[in-house]
Image (spheres, rainbow, N blue to C red):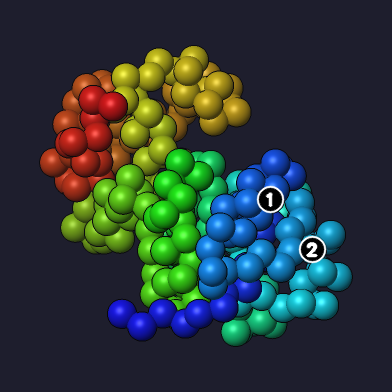
Amino acid sequence: MAVQADVRVFVIDPQPIVIATLRTVFAGTADITQVGGATSWLTAYPQFNRCPPDVVLLELASPLDDGLELIRHFREYHPGVEVLVFSGEGRRVLCALRAGARGFLLKSTGRTQLIEAVRRARAGIATVSPELLCQLVAEVQQDGSRPKLSARELEVLRLVAAGHRNADIARDLFVTEATVKSHLQRVFGKLKVNDRAEAVRAATAAGLLCAEGLNR
């Protein structure tokens, strides 16, 4: 595979330590240069225009930006820039790809895999963290023949399948326990089941959950 050299990368992440760490990572390569970094698009804009990058590494789950809108902005106004989501959480993978992201990596991704993904993005080749492929396939396969669960309902159900209690789920998702119970009741209704165990089994059988991930 021929991958273009001299890749210019810009990082948008609300945590300055991430920007600094990535600068160190890319400094160890011969063909990738981090040309800028900012904690939000508001502060990124002046740098971005002075030295336009080839690839933007974007934290989708940022309190400072609407990540999906930002991806769409790049697609419309900077079509030559590839966006590679580099996030601490795996939510909204399909939404990000539909918005125009060239890939979606978790921050647990190793240095070598990250560098290769940046090179692939520059060449127009998509990369998704292996841990997220199961989720992505499940979301893509939700059609008229399958129960249609919302992204948040799927998220709650995955946490249930992983053995989390309602209180844990509420804390992880920054919602109330009542909200978690409400999501579960809708899941039970859509899957036509009566309890959590039946919901997990039904969702797995329908391809909405991956069996190999249930005991993590």
Tag 1's secondary structure? helix
Residue drawn at point x = 49 percent, y = 66 percent: 118
Please tell me in which quadrant of the rendered image residue 93 appears.
bottom left
Asked if labels 2 and 1 touch by Cβ distance under 8 angstroms, the answer is no
Q: Is residue 10 above or below residue 22?
A: below
Please tell me in which quadrant of the rendered image residue 176 appears.
top right
Q: Is residue 201 visible?
A: yes
Residue drawn at point x = 25 percent, y = 41 percent: 209
Q: CA distance from mark 1 to mark 2?
A: 12 Å
User: x%, y% of residue 50?
Assistant: 82, 77
User: x%, y% of residue 148?
Assistant: 32, 50
Q: Which mark is residue 44?
A: 2
User: x%, y% of residue 34?
Assistant: 66, 64
Which three-letter amino acid code belongs to the residue tagged 1? Ile
Position of the N terminus, as image quadrant, is bottom left
Residue drawn at point x = 17 percent, y = 36 percent: 211
Q: Is residue 52 above or below residue 149?
A: below
Locate residue 1 relative to residue 88 in the image: left or right: left
How many residues crowd around disc 1 within 10 Å: few (fewer than 14), some, or many (20 or more)? many
Q: Which mark is residue 19?
A: 1
Q: Which mark is residue 54?
A: none
Query: Which residue occupies the foreground of this view, 19 or 183?
Result: 19
Locate residue 88 relative to residue 193 in the image: left or right: right
Tag 2's secondary structure? helix
Which three-letter amino acid code belongs to the residue tagged 2? Ala
Nearest-to-viewer mark from 1 and 2: 1
Q: Earlier in the sequence, mark 1 or mark 2?
A: 1
Query: Which residue occupies the foreground of this view, 120 or 64?
Result: 120
Q: Residue at the left extreme?
A: 205
How many residues crowd around disc 2 within 10 Å: few (fewer than 14), some, or many (20 or more)? some
